[in-house]
């Protein structure tokens, strides 16, 4: 599924990239074709300008014909009867050309040929003059006259519309030294925001060093390209949703797998923890069925003591399991009241003193808080301190006598800190982030060198959180651990 989703996403990305590339190429082709037509139109305008100029000069230079029928206009051809002062055929010659009845035989054909020849030579001379003027004088004219901004803008708009591209644009004309001849108001800002500049040389027949270039940019080109591919975005979006759901599903699957493994460990540990006291109670019950035991007060008392002790042990284990069932309903069952932190700590330390001394160790309490009053449930708070001290005993080092220390202090006027410190085996750094999770145990699996269900620290963390406080752990392997509880003061 992951490969399929990644493949689908890759195909969509490649498709969008190719579409953007194709749209850019199409856009560039349309723009360059339009700019080429603009340059062609400007060349035609310039040709028309020089043609009109030379025609006007030719008309002004016409003089009355001499007796020989040759004019002094400088064109060097016969300016006889076929033309009037405008260079056009006279009406009588047009009549002669159009009516063969007025001319006869060979004379008529020769007269018509002379007329056509004269017209051809006149127009040829006129065009030659225009070409020479363009070659010699066109590049000397200012570019603002040869291609004024209004005309250029009109031609650009016209050609873009003809090619099906109607969108705003900015343009500028520069010379060969890249100096602006003129530019539109938004050209520089458009170039800064949009790096796509389309250029076309104007009047490419100009001499080297006198080239002028038309530069056009489109501020909304990105929007135009995006509008052509936006229909793909929903598909892209839904693919991302599928990927997110898939990743979330995988995370849930691994989380459930982890919880399942922890619950299996919990069941294995619980079975072992319950099996020992049940076996002891069963053995004591069998002893009571023996008449020899019932007749001996010593044996009877011993069996009763075993049953009592193992029953307490079994009840204690059951209560630890039931502690976790209270997590979702603790807010309703907690009875918050004013509690003296120092008093609770002192009471729990005294209770543990005999248990610690049993292993040759010691426990001390340094009650340094000046204001120890907090708003907590006394029973649950007592269980919190009890669980931390109980863990310190269970995770003691075999080669060193356990040394436990509980301190209280006020870091500021609003909080009290309770620290539980030991010299036990310590906790690995990678386990510190997980020790407050439900069912998590550093020693997992069906190992019973250390008894427990992985519920104690989860219960501690839950209670401290409900009291409005925080708890953190510091530990170093082989040197011990420290648990630091911070609670808000009642005031």
Image (cartoon, rainbow, N blue to C red):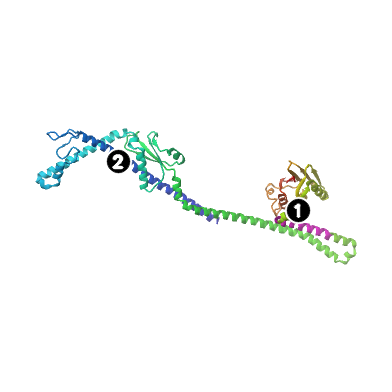
Q: Is residue 176 left or right of residue 331?
A: left
Residue 322 visible in the picture? yes
Which quarter of the figure has residue 32? Answer: top left
Q: Is residue 344 left or right of residue 68?
A: right
Q: Which mark is residue 205?
A: none
**Nearer to the camera, 156 or 239:** 156
**Nearer to the camera, 277 or 48:** 48
Above or below 171: residue 302: below
Whole-percent x, y for residue 177 in the image: 39, 33
Quadrant the C terminus occupies: top right
Q: What residue is disc 1 on? A: 335
Whole-percent x, y for residue 324 in the image: 72, 56
Q: Is residue 89 left or right of residue 303?
A: left
Whole-percent x, y for residue 63 in the image: 17, 33
Give the label, 2 or 1, closer to the camera. Answer: 1
> In percent of the image, x 20 and y 33: which residue is there?
61
**Nearer to the camera, 245 or 44:** 44
Q: What residue is disc 2 on? A: 44
| Mark sitting earlier along the chain (2/1) | 2
Q: Is residue 137 magenta?
A: no
Whole-percent x, y for residue 341 in the image: 78, 47
Residue 486 visible in the picture? no
What is the crowding at mark 1: few (fewer than 14 residues within 10 Å), some, or many (at least 20)?
few
> In percent of the image, x 35 and y 45: which residue is there?
159
Q: Is residue 103 left or right of residue 450?
A: left
Residue span colored magenta: 306-328
Examine the residues drawn in magenta and state their main secondary structure.
Answer: helix
| Tag 2 secondary structure | helix
Which quarter of the figure has residue 241? Answer: bottom right
Which quarter of the figure has residue 280? Answer: bottom right
Quadrant the N terminus occupies: bottom right
């Amino acid at each position: 599924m992951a490969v399929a989703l990644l493949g689908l996403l890759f195909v969509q990305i490649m498709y969008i990239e190719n579409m953007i590339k194709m749209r850019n190429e199409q856009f560039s082709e349309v723009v360059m074709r339009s700019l080429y037509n603009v340059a062609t139109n400007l060349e035609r305008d310039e040709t028309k300008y020089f043609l009109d100029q030379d025609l006007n000069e030719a008309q002004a230079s016409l003089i009355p014909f001499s007796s020989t029928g040759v004019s002094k206009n400088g064109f060097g051809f016969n300016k006889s009867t076929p033309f009037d002062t405008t260079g056009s055929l006279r009406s009588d010659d047009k009549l002669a050309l159009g009516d063969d009845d007025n001319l006869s035989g060979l004379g008529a054909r020769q007269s018509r040929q002379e007329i056509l020849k004269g017209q051809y030579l006149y127009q040829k001379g006129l065009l030659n003059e225009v070409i020479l003027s363009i070659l010699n004088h066109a590049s000397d004219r200012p570019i603002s006259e040869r291609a004024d901004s209004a005309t250029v803008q009109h031609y650009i708009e016209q050609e873009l519309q003809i090619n099906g591209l109607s969108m705003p644009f900015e343009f500028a004309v520069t010379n060969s030294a890249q100096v602006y001849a003129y530019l539109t108001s938004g050209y520089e800002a458009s170039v800064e925001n949009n790096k796509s500049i389309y250029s076309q040389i104007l009047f490419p027949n100009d001499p080297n060093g006198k080239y002028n270039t038309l530069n056009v940019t489109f501020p909304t080109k990105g929007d135009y390209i995006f509008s052509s591919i936006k229909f793909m975005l929903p598909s892209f979006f839904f693919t991302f949703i599928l990927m997110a759901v898939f990743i979330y599903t995988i995370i849930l699957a691994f989380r459930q797998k982890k919880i399942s493994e922890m619950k299996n460990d919990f069941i294995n540990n619980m079975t072992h923890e319950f099996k020992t006291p049940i076996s002891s109670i069963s053995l004591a019950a069998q002893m009571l069925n023996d008449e020899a035991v019932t007749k001996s007060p010593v044996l009877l008392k011993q069996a009763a003591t075993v049953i009592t002790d193992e029953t307490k042990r079994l009840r204690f284990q059951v209560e630890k399991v039931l502690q976790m069932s209270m997590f979702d309903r603790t807010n309703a069952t907690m009875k918050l009241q004013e509690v003296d932190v120092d008093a609770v700590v002192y009471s729990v330390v005294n209770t543990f003193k005999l248990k610690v001394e049993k292993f040759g160790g010691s426990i001390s309490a340094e009650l340094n808080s000046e204001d120890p009053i907090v708003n907590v449930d006394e029973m649950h708070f007592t269980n919190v301190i009890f669980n931390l001290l109980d863990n310190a005993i269970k995770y003691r080092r075999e080669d060193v006598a356990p040394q436990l220390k509980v301190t209280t202090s006020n870091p500021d006027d609003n909080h009290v800190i309770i620290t539980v410190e030991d010299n036990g085996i310590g906790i690995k750094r990678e386990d510190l982030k997980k020790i407050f999770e439900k069912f998590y145990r550093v020693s997992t699996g069906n190992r019973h060198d250390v008894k427990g269900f992985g519920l104690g620290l989860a219960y501690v963390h839950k209670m401290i959180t409900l009291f409005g406080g925080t708890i953190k752990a510091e530990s170093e392997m082989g040197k011990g651990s420290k648990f630091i509880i911070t609670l808000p003061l009642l005031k």
